[in-house]
Image (cartoon, rainbow, N blue to C red):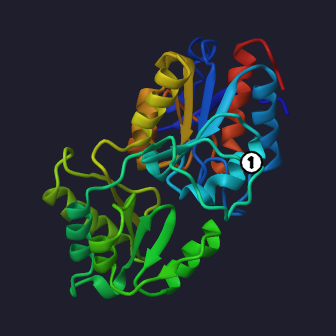
Amino acid sequence: MVFTEAWQSGSGGQQPFPHHLARAIRLIVLDIDGTIAGRNNQINPPVLAAIQAAQARGLAVTIATGRMYCSALRFHREIQTPLPLIAYQGAWMDQPDHSQPADRPKPKPLFHRPLDRAVAREVVDFLEEPAWGDRLSVHLYVNDRLLIRHLTPASQDYADRTGVTPIEVGDLRQVLAQGPEPTKVLALSPDRHLTRDLLEKLRQRYCAQEAYLTTSVSTFLEVAHPDVNKGNALRHLAEQQLGLRPEQVMFVGDNFNDSEAIAYAGLGVAMGDAPEPVKAIAQWVAPSVEEDGAARAIEQVLAASGSVL
């Protein structure tokens, strides 16, 4: 599994792999969808082999995803890491106990930064406005459960991909009034132009100090606590829990929700099919997920430290 060509076309043309940055890496953090899991919703063997080779060399590896914690557990289990799992765009971090059944009631996570209830209520009201509400599926995430008004084809597709069973609750506002604060709100629609336009409308309503607004897939828009993003979660894990510096971290991701983590890491890698603005902030652009680009990035780090797969 030797990758001899360390060049990949990015937004700036041919781009050499920055081996001088790779030599310092001690922690590798990977996104899931579009990074280590493509159309088949699995980690391909070359990617898993590269992760295992990095771990054998003493590098720490874990996952940072926008997925629900329960949905990301199987990936965390597969890479067999002792490190915490970062979920919900960084709003939730916990140390999985894979010896326990997945449906066992969960204790309080190591870290949880929920969205303010009032902001969540305003966002749900906005997303359910008659002008576009019938073209959107609105998801509310509470205590690592997916709550929906009613099941739509888009929500069913989401459930099939993530392996999560949605809970139909009727009025989401009633849940917000009576239950715990939500981790995030997500809206999805087959109409990517609609989600893009609504994301811009929300950005006009809320400044960065009021809500974190992002997209992980072109048909999704997501709203979380203003301090939430993968970059902040990565900083917390690396610096506060592991005692590492940013230059000792590599992060690999593929979309706008990965931007902050790519910018934080000493070696930020964007996947080959990432949006151009995401590629522009990366130190290297890997091949696409279907070409096992995450494996190529890890292989280059190992090659820089004297190990060739």
Rendering coords of residue 62 (x, y %):
64, 37
Foreground of the two, 192 or 83: 83
Q: Is residue 121 visible?
A: yes
Residue 5 placement, left or right of 63: right
Foreground of the two, 120 or 218: 120
Rendering coords of residue 284 (x, y %):
54, 30
Q: Residue furthest left?
A: 205
Foreground of the two, 9 or 63: 63
Quarter of the picture holding the N terminus: top right
Rendering coords of residue 303 (x, y %):
75, 18
Q: Is residue 266 visible?
A: no
In percent of the image, x 25 and y 52: which residue is there? 211
Residue 268 placement, left or right of 25: left
Q: Quadrant of residue 52?
A: top right
Type of the residue with mark 1: Arg
Foreground of the two, 271 or 167: 167
Say if 282 sits above or below 94 in the image: above
Residue 145 placement, left or right of 76: left
**Residue hosting label 1:** 77
In percent of the image, x 61 and y 18: which residue is there? 25
Quarter of the picture holding the C terminus: top right
Residue 126 placement, left or right of 234: left
In percent of the image, x 81 and y 29: which residue is there? 53
Mark 1, Cα crowd under 10 Å, few <14 / some 14-19 / many 20+, is: some
Q: State the SS at label 1.
A: helix
In percent of the image, x 36 and y 80: which residue is there? 136
